[in-house]
Amino acid sequence: MIDRRDVGSWLEGPGTGPRQYPGQRLGRPAAGPGSVGRPGRRLVALALDWYLCWALAAWLAPQWNQHGLVTLALLFLLNVLLVGAAGHTLGHWVTGLQVQTLDGRPSGFARAVVRSLLLCLLIPPVVFDPDQRGLHDRAADTILVRTR
């Protein structure tokens, strides 16, 4: 008689090895500081940054902000300046996240420009790899990690 546990199933998915977590291939811890920032924190950070930029646009240029382009431009500028200088936006800071290079250094302005430009296109952040790095992070050679 055949034991079904020995045969396995296509429903189980590929591989039977130990379960990997996001960032394991990059040498990041599973949880805590230095681990990959999870989608919930990322969404909260983006929502905080977007709301801040929306409020600034409504205050600074109410007549130009009918289509949200001023808000988007402010989001780009906020990301370039703050990620380039400090490694995080205000939303990242509140949620305990930081943008770093793969070896743990600050991203710098050049990477911040690439990352921010692609972030504003919206498609790259929602398409991500097993390490939960969006296309914008892969193109800029960065990773969003927890700081606390």
Image (cartoon, grey):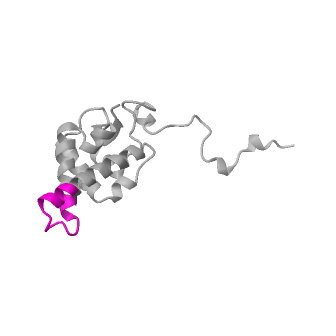
Residue 67 magenta-drawn? yes
Quadrant showing the N terminus: top right
The spot of residue 13 in percent (x, y) is: 61, 48
Residue at 60% x, 42% y: name it: 15
Above or below residue 64? Residue 143 is: above
Seen as rendered, the residue at the extreme front is: 59
* Farthest-out residue, right: 1
The verdict on residue 99 being magenta is: no
- Residue nearest the viewer, comparing 51 with 8: 51
14 in relation to 58, above or below:
above
Residue at image x 39%, y 38%? 36
Quarter of the image for the C terminus: give it.
top left
Q: Give the range drawn in magenta.
A: 55-73
Residue under the point 27% across and 54% down: 50
Quadrant for residue 2, please give it: top right
Q: In this view, does 25 lie to the left or right of 46?
A: right
